[in-house]
Image: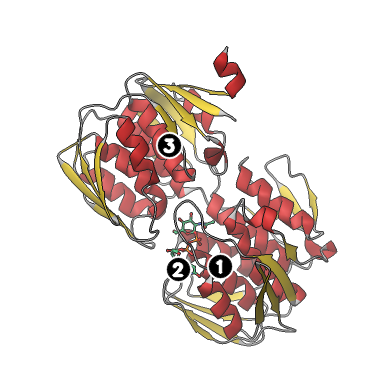
Amino acid sequence: MKKLIVKGGRTLKGTVTVSSSKNSILPLLAASLLSNGEVTLEALPAIRDVSTMIELLRRFGAKITNEKYSTVKIDPTTAMFVEAPYEIIKTMRASFIVLGPLLAKMGRARVSMPGGCAIGNRPIDLHLEGLKKLGACIDIEEGYILAKASRLRGNKISLNFPSVGATENLMMAASMATGETVIENAAREPEIVDLADFLRKMGADIHGDGSDTLHIIGVDELKPVVFRPIPDRIEAATYIIAGAMAGDTVEVKNIVPDHLEIVLSKLRTAGVQMEVFDNRCIVKGCKRFNAVDFKSTPYPGFPTDLQAQMMILLCLAEGQSVVREEIFENRFMHVAELKRMGADIEIKNRKAVIRGVKKLKGAPVMVSDLRAGAALLLAALVAEGQTVLNRIYHLERGYDNFVDKFIGLGADLKLSNEESLKK
Ligand code: UD1
């Protein structure tokens, strides 16, 4: 199994370009099933989650071309299978968002239930209740959701939590339903707006994206589009934090500063110096930070996907910071590993109390999920000595070309498999 060996203490300097948003592309790939012709998606990152979703579309019978390059063409008109098998859903629970488009386009779907994951229980009740409101008949059989509807019908749906995935599933399904759907307490993330832009370009009638109420008037057909997703705000912030902790001067290109408002504001409070332009940011390295309290909440709040990375910076801050995780019940898996690197963190339920230390020290660590992996990599870059990150495949799920990007900034890291480590 691949490991990442990081020698800490190198000063980062130079420019890094952020890739397209993973969390945008996955629903866009699913939404391409709704088209009546070939959809083109540009600037795709080389990450495992994207290949997994493409593989799933291929299993439905969609014709996929050019997938090796950053442009992929999806012709869903040849798709005739409606089963999303357990072996794919278990490796990437986000693939569950094919349920809405399959149902809207094919009238039926058989999609494996995702089950829990490393960061929490992650139920799907909001997806299923919403689809029932749109007239779908839903059964559960042998771990699979069986959904049927000859034609979905618009309705009012009120989510009891602004779930990103449920909003996406329902928005895609409602785009081809009859009549109007109103989704209240919808998620407001930039990726929702990107999906709405994509669907509108296909001919969908959607209003209110970016607010908590979506209005969708169903149409009979959606047409092919050529589309480029938004930059990945989580990747962007990960490099900004790296620049702040280990940088001399690091330029992070291809960002949308509006998508990062609360994150940039918390970083400034922590003492990070940045110059922010229209689509890039220059961050200066800093030796010591101020303690900052924050909690992860739905957008426009602080993203749960950056909670772990921000915590690394606070490990080296002056004084005590308190971090509350409000989205997922088990998203402090990185903490035990960080303690092995010398961090002083105490967990009380959904709260982490971090007392700043002068330095972190390299150690072998285990990556439990994608963002925990990013956080441990940041810790390794500033730690004294060598850190070996095990189960690095989690990072490959969502960070495009991260080894070369960090090496390009001057970091000392290399991928290795077990055999070569023994030599
Ligand atoms: C998406 C993102 C993920 C991010 C998360 C929160 C993608 C591919 N993934 O995941 O990176 O961390 O948003 O910003 O875009 N919930 C329910 N019932 C449901 C659905 C969700 O109770 O039917 C709960 C979840 O357990 C969780 C919370 O709602 O506690 C947020 O989940 P949700 O917004 O749905 O996250 P995902 O769409 O899975």
- Ligand 1 under 8 Å from disc 2 Cβ: yes
Do the CB atoms of the residues marked 3 and 2 lie less than 8 Å apart?
Answer: no
CA gap, disc 3 and disc 1: 29 Å
Disc 3 and disc 2: Cα gap in Å? 27 Å
Q: Indicate yes or no: mark 3 CB to ligand 1 under 8 Å.
A: no
Q: Position of residue 151 (x, y in %)?
A: 72, 84
Q: Earlier in the sequence, mark 3 or mark 1?
A: 1
Specify the farthest residue to the left: 319
Residue 303, relative to residue 108: is it above or below?
A: above
- Viewer-proximal residue, 214 or 117? 117
Q: Quadrant of the N terminus?
A: top right
| Residue closest to the eye, 14 or 341 | 341
Secondary element at image label 3:
strand
Q: Quadrant of residue 36?
A: bottom right
**What residue lies at 81% left-to-right and 65% top-to-bottom?**
81
Q: Earlier in the sequence, mark 3 or mark 2?
A: 2
Q: Is residue 171 visible?
A: yes
Query: Which numbered tag is attached to residue 187?
Result: 2
Q: Secondary structure at mark 2?
A: loop
Above-or-below relation of 216 to 294: below
Which residue occupies the extreme front position in the image?
142
- Say few, some or many: other residues with alpha carbon within 10 Å of mark 3 (under 14 / 14 to 19 / 20 or more): many
Amino acid type at image mark 3: Val
User: Could you tell whether 122 is left or right of 344 in the image?
Assistant: right
Asked whether the beta carbons under mark 2 and mark 1 sit within 8 Å of each other, the answer is: yes
**Residue 20, percent from left and from top:** 55, 47
* Residue that mark 3 sits on: 252
